Image (tube, grey):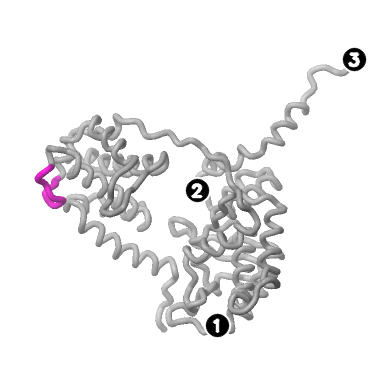
């Protein structure tokens, strides 16, 4: 019997092939670094690093007079020793706005930090192996990230969103009504699942029908980094999934997509972009002031769970955060009401 390739294994294979293509556009010596980080990073991370490091070499070719006659293949590891902290400060300035072919690229705080982090990791590899003698990346400051407030749906907005998905078809006619009826149970199940478990959109689209366990009301998800974990769901998620399953059974999937839990209208596994589009489509009918994405539905769940339990470690575990500090940073700050109660909880003197 042929072994079933999971969505995540298939994505890894595609990413590995894509990474090879990107590596062909980098200086040849870079391959050693990517081989070294293979066991400690995901394919997605390595692709991001490859793009970030390629921008660095493009900057040298375009902006540094010392390399004006160079091509990518001319760079050897020695070039890293010729770069100074001042060059890297110019690189940071360049990253804020630069031309990438026809496209004008910009980077905010997060983009700058990620690109400098990638370069630091790259330099550290060659420095530790004594292939270079200097590491100017440690001499420059990484941009400070200013925390933004969490955007999430309020309790009444969650109810409005689910009610809207359930009943908006009443106002539609013709082809729009047909399409709505066809996708209604899927969309309701998908959004209820995201809101009721806090799973990531990539984890959601990766679900197979075999991953759903109604006996224990749990779904087996593959977390970032490849770890598998069972996430439990409540009666509302159970009902929405059970309403969707007869619809799913009526779909004849394309070859290779037979196991997917959620299908697109093309009868293949639904993709991340499609889920982002449908969340945006429904959410804008409920709120115009908040830009709601699948990740904001995750934040909505995390916030509700923290406010209900006050247990930051439980929230971190259920959301699949490796470091509880990530969770604290995002969710502990929201509990202002609890801190306000602390102000009147302790009496210093009895009323006379």
Residue that badge 2 annotates: 322
Q: Is residue 73 magenta?
A: yes
Q: Residue at x 46, y 77 (%)?
A: 257
Does any portion of residue 336 appear in the rendered image? yes
Residue that badge 1 annotates: 251
Q: Looking at the image, is mark 2 or mark 3 nearer the viewer? A: 3
Residue 113: give x, y in percent of width and height: 38, 40
Mark 1 lies on a secondary structure that is loop
Locate residue 84: give its quadrant: top left
Residue 104: give x, y in percent of width and height: 32, 49
Q: Earlier in the sequence, mark 2 or mark 3?
A: 2
Q: Earlier in the sequence, mark 1 or mark 3?
A: 1
Circle 1 packing at 10 Å, graded few (<14), some (14-19), many (20+), is few
Residue 127: give x, y in percent of width and height: 22, 38
Residue that badge 3 annotates: 352
Q: Residue at x 63, y 72 (%)?
A: 184
Please name whichever residue, 277 or 25, is drawn nearer the observer in this view of the structure. 277
Tell me the CA gap for discs 2 and 1: 37 Å
């Amino acid at each position: 019997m042929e072994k079933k390739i999971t969505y995540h294994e298939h994505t890894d294979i595609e990413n590995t092939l894509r990474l090879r293509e990107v590596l062909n556009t980098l200086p040849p010596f870079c391959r050693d670094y990517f081989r070294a980080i293979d066991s400690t990073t995901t394919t997605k991370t390595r692709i991001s690093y490859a793009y970030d490091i390629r921008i660095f070499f493009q900057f040298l070719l375009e902006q540094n007079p010392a390399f004006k006659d160079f091509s990518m293949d001319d760079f050897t590891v020695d070039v890293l020793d010729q770069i100074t902290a001042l060059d890297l400060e110019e690189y940071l300035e360049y990253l804020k706005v630069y031309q990438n072919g026809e496209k004008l690229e910009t980077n905010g705080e997060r983009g700058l930090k990620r690109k400098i982090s990638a370069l630091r990791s790259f330099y550290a590899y060659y420095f530790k192996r004594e292939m270079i003698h200097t590491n100017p990346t440690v001499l420059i400051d990484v941009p400070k990230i200013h925390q933004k407030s969490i955007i999430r749906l309020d309790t009444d907005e969650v109810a409005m969103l689910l009610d809207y998905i359930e009943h908006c078809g009443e106002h539609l006619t013709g082809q729009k009504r047909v399409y709505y009826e066809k996708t209604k149970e899927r969309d309701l199940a998908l959004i209820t699942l995201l809101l009721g478990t806090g799973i990531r959109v990539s984890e959601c689209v990766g679900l197979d029908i075999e991953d759903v366990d109604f006996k224990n009301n749990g779904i087996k998800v593959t977390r970032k980094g490849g770890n598998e974990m069972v996430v439990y769901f409540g009666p509302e998620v159970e009902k929405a999934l059970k309403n969707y399953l007869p619809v799913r059974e009526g779909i004849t999937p394309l070859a290779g997509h037979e196991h997917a839990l959620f299908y697109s209208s093309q009868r293949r596994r639904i993709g991340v972009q499609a889920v982002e589009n449908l969340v945006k489509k429904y959410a804008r009918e409920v709120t115009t002031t908040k830009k709601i994405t699948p990740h904001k539905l995750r934040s909505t769940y995390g916030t509700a769970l923290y406010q209900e339990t006050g247990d930051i470690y439980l929230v971190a575990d259920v959301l699949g955060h490796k470091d509880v500090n990530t969770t604290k940073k995002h969710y502990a700050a929201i509990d202002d009401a609890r801190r306000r109660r602390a102000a009147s909880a302790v009496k210093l003197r009895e009323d006379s």
